[in-house]
Amino acid sequence: MNFKNKIFKSIFFTLICITFSFSVFSQEFEKEETDKQKSKLSDNIFFGGSFGLQFGTITYIQAEPIVGYRLTPRVSLGVGGMFTYLRNSQYDYTTYFYGPMVFAQAFIYKEIYLHTELEMLNIEKFDAYGYSENNRIWLPGVKAGLGYQKVIAGRLRLNACVLWNFTQTEDTPYSNPIIRIGMIF
């Protein structure tokens, strides 16, 4: 009986070790798959935007940060925002506008892409004579156009696009066409 007990214990111990090994291997395999998915997710997220400065009689400071996600190598979606400060010392005038936006990009040929965006700008409202009414309004905007993206190094890319605002009004703070140059990584 002693011999049978030893065999039984050995088989039992071996089965437990094999089961534990498969469990560890399975968890390691699942961890590798999860890590691949995580790295894929992080590889598809990009950050960037554009920044503008001008000093002198007219001071202009603009920041447009963005965060995007590459759905496929050719199609991206994202969100961003805009903040612009404008001061004209000749007329002692200062204003600012800001707001969120969502965008989509689709590459149509190599580095050339279509770009569309929807924005909501909070701007200062002016009367018919150009004087501020001291109130602010939300102004929607729909823009679309073409862009060019050039890889500089690794994930760093230079973007340049020309957009057209299809909802331009007398209150829109910029005129068509809109030229934008920025970086993403």
Image: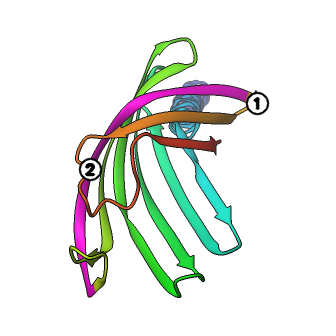
Q: Residues within 10 Å of mark 2 (few under 14, many from 20)?
A: some
Q: Is residue 169 above or below residue 135?
A: above
Residue at 71% across, 73% down: 56
On-image quarter of the C terminus: top right
Q: What SS does tag 2 mark?
A: loop
Residue at 60% across, 35% down: 159
Residue 23 visible in the shown view = no
Q: Is residue 10 above or below residue 61?
A: above
On-image quarter of the N terminus: top right
Circle number at residue 121? none
Circle number at residue 152? 1
The answer to if 135 sits in the magenta stretch is yes
Disc 2 or disc 1, which is closer to the eye?
A: 2
Q: Disc 2 or 1, which lies upstream in sequence? A: 1
* Magenta stretch, residue numbers: 133-151
**Residue 140 image point, x, y percent:** 23, 57
What secondary structure is the magenta-colored segment mainly?
strand
Q: What SS does tag 1 mark?
A: strand
Amino acid on which disc 1 is placed: Ile
> As drawn, is 155 to the left or to the right of 144?
right
Mark 2 touches mark 1? (CB < 8 Å): no
Amino acid on which disc 2 is placed: Gln
The answer to if 179 sits in the magenta stretch is no
**Residue 94 image point, x, y percent:** 49, 83
- Tell me where residue 58 sits by quadrant: bottom right
| Residue at the disc numbered 2 | 168
- Tell me where residue 158 sits by quadrant: top right
